Amino acid sequence: MSESDIETRVRKIVVEHLGVEEEKVTENASFIDDLGADSLDTVELVMAFEEEFGIEIPDDAAETIQTFGDAVKFIKDAV
Amino acid sequence: MFDLTGKSALVTGASGGIGGEIARTLYGAGANVGLSGTREAPLQELADELGERAHVLPCDLGDAEALAALPKRATEAMGGLDILVNNAGITRDTLMLRMSDADWDAVLDVNLTAAMKLSRAALRGMMKSRWGRIVNISSIVGATGNPGQANYAAAKAGLVGFSKSLAAEVASRGITVNCVAPGFIATAMTQKLDAGQSEALLAAIPAGRMGEADEIAAGVLYLASREAAYVTGSTLHINGGMAMI
């Protein structure tokens, strides 16, 4: 799976779940500070990533996923 | 007044007196109902009585594998899972000094842990649809205590703390989590009491009688309804005034 493929799929999940515009989902965009997520949203996002990519994201790793870029990097290393 | 048309409700312990009546009441309000319980015959009988929106889902909540599979089976059978009523309960009454670890574990597993596991599984769909109702059947003894029921009372009080915490977590998603705490209700479980116990019990109930299962079911229906959207983390005591809390 290419990085841009991962990016596209992650962005789609974020856009759908948080109801934000695609342009706002940039590499350094923080889910909570920039995209309006609350703590429950971040848990739901992590669960959605797990489902989409068939991976498991442990709690301590999930805590480090703060931005769109963090998510893409974690998933790239995990798949 | 309360219309649950299009909603799907899973009721555990539906082969028992209170659970069966809860299922009947939710069905009557238009919901699809999943009837879960350990004994298949009474579940089937109830499903036959109700009609095509009722689905029989036998499950022993003490069996970890069967428990894990139940939410998916329920969702598939009903096409969704919007309302979860954790009603299943068992007793292993004995005084503390005589209570074995097995007596404790069995009651906590079925009455508290199973409710947590079913709630956790049901939450995903509820979060997605931004609507859900979880109603946990607690008990008056969870609030007052009762000699011989340390395990049962701990589990029932546990449900209250569990419900409040979960209610706070998911309130922003249109999901409510509440408890109904029955007092003494005329069912097979309370028929085990002897005449002396029954008499003493009635003297302690201001209403002067035991409650009926449909009086509990009415409370559950309310908490499951759209109208109760603003009620969460609360415990509805239905006990004839036996404990005014």
Image: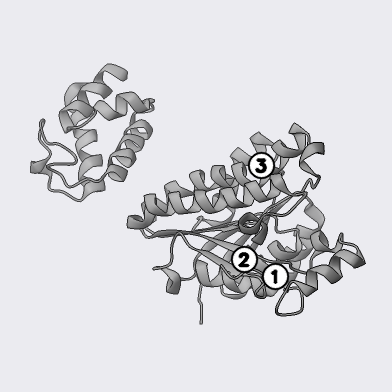
The answer to whether residue A1 shows anywhere in this view is no
Q: Which residue is mark 1?
A: B50
Locate residue B178, reporting x and y percent.
50, 60
Q: Position of residue B224 (x, y in %)?
A: 51, 67
Judge from the rendering whether residue B177 lies leftward or rightward of residue B58; answer left or right.
left
- State the separation of the CA atoms marked 2 and 3: 31 Å
Density class for disc 1 (Cα within 10 Å; few <14, some 14-19, many ≥20) is some
Question: Residue placed at 76% from the left, 79% from the top?
Answer: B208
First-in-chain label (2 vs 3): 2
Q: Please, is residue A2 above or below residue B210 in the view?
A: above
Label ID, residue A65: none
Chain of the residue that carries numbered disc 3 in the rendered image: B
SS at badge 1:
helix
Task: Give the mark toward the camera: 2 or 3.
Answer: 3
Looking at the image, is mark 1 or mark 3 nearer the viewer? 3
Q: Which residue is mark 3?
A: B108
> Which of pointers 1 and 3 lies earlier in the amino acid sequence?
1
Residue B155 in percent (x, y) is at: 63, 47
Mark number for residue B53?
Answer: 2
Tell which of B242 and B102 is nearer to you: B242
